[in-house]
Each structure stands twice: as C-alpha cells, then as structure tokens.
Image: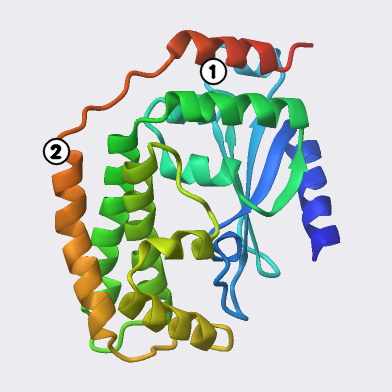
Amino acid sequence: MLEKIQQLLSDCETHHGIDILYACESGSRAWGFASPDSDYDIRFIYRRPIKDVYQITSVSDTIEIPIKDDLDPGGWELRKALSLLTSSNGALLEWLHSPIIYRANEAFLSEIRALAQESLSPVTLANHYRGMAQKVLKTGLSKNKPTGKSYLYGLRASLAAHYVLKTGRYAPVVFSELLSLLDSPERAVVDDLLSWKETAGEKDSPGRLPIIDQYLENSQVNIVEACASLSPRPSPLDALNALLHRWTLWP
C-alpha cells in the first residue's frame, strides 16, 4: 500500500504540475482507531510555480482526487494552507502533526510546525473541536444504535478541546495520548470500545454507552464555560507571509 501511495503522489505532481512539500495520513488511521475497512485518507500541501500562481485567471488552491482502491487523496496549495493557520484550522494542524508521514521536505515541515504553534489561538481551536463533537451528538449519536465510529469521533473531539484549553497547545493526533484526561469509569468504557473497534466495521454499533453519552453532554457545557473567558489570539501575518514567500516555487 505504501508503494501505491508514493506512486499516487508522484502521479499527482506530474499531472497537476505541482511540488508536494508534505503528505500524511489523516483521520482514523492517524488517530489510531481505524476499522479493518477504513480508507486511507491521504492529505498533502503543495506549491505551484510562480508563473501558475501569478496570472490573470485564477488557479484552484485545492486538489481533490476520486477515491480508488481505498485511497482517498486531497491537498491544499501552500497559500491556502498558510491562510488557514490564521484561523487555527483543526484539520490542517492535525495534518502537520500526523504520526504517519508519507513525504516531507523536512526544512519546510519544521518551519510550518513552529509557525502553527505561534499562530495557534486556543479558544478558536477548542471551539472547532467542540463544534465537531456537537455535530456528532446531533447526528450519529442521536440514533438508536450509534456506531462505534461516532462514539470515538465525538470523544476525540471533546478530549482534544479539553487538551487545547488545558495546555494552550494543539492536541495530540493519536487518540490514546488524550485518554489520560478521562476519569477511571469513562476510561474503562473507552478501553473496551477500542478493543471492540479493532474487529468491527465502520457501521457496526456497540450499543448505547450511557456513561459516554453523559460525558459528551457535560463536555459541551464545560468547554463553552472555559472558552468564555478567553479571546482569540491575533495571527503573526508577517511571519506567515515570509514563509509563503520563502517556499513559493520560483522558476
């Protein structure tokens, strides 16, 4: 599979005339609780030659490729990625700190990771994760037989929000690194859920988990209260522009 992914990235560079600076795994495989039938969510940051960026007609800043053979690839152009750092975009921050890296310009990765932390607004990122958890509560977990996937997505989002508010840093991507935030009763249920998920399909249900339902409901209130006393942090635009200029692909 790794060979297929590398070939896909190389083909993408050739077809679109781009240079991929960074590529990683995102989603459940990066989080550590993928199902046996999970896709590979391949995400990347790329740059174009300056002649393609600076022209009269606009050029797309996103590449989306149809899913094929369990590979789900997509990427953002450098300028778009850096603009998303100004709003502490949770998806981008998770890409940058994924434990599964397929390709990386190490100098670029070091620079953008440092700037990602400098740009981070804890209240903005915590609210992003709270919104993700709330969406899961209103959709997947409102069903009579919620999937294990829905429970884990809601839990991860809630725990990530709590971590950001507690530390002022981006949350770990790997789910197991967030579990220390849980009390013993919730932790025991989650450990059982993770063991069950190892052989369960994407749409399988473990049944209702009342202790987790209650935890997720309480977390919504707790996160809102914690965010109320915080203000968004301004972004270091000069530093972001400098990185953009430094890594734009000149002819």
Closer mark to the observer between disc 1 and disc 2 = 2
Q: Is residue 240 above or below residue 172?
A: above
Front residue of 249/244: it is 244
Q: Residues within 10 Å of mark 1 (few under 14, many from 20)?
A: few
Coordinates of residue 145 in the picture (x, y in percent): 29, 88
Q: Quadrant of the C terminus?
A: top right
Q: Is residue 207 above or below residue 82?
A: below
Q: Residues within 10 Å of mark 2 (few under 14, many from 20)?
A: few
The residue under label 1 is which amino acid type? Thr
Q: Which residue is mark 2?
A: 228
Front residue of 185/81: it is 185
Seen at 70% across and 26% down, the residue is: 108
For this orientation, the residue located farthest to the front is 184
> Can residue 80 be seen in the rendering of this structure?
no
Disc 1 and disc 2: Cα gap in Å? 43 Å
The residue under label 2 is which amino acid type? Ala
- Residue 2 relative to residue 52: left or right: right
Q: Which residue is mark 1?
A: 57
Coordinates of residue 21 in the picture (x, y in percent): 72, 32
Mark 2 element type: loop
Q: Is residue 151 above or below residue 31?
A: below
Coordinates of residue 189 in the picture (x, y in percent): 38, 83
- Residue 2 relative to residue 53: left or right: right
- Residue 87 relative to residue 218: left or right: right
Front residue of 91/160: it is 160
Q: Earlier in the sequence, mark 1 or mark 2?
A: 1
For this orientation, the residue located farthest to the bottom is 207
Mark 1 element type: loop
Q: Which mark is residue 185?
A: none
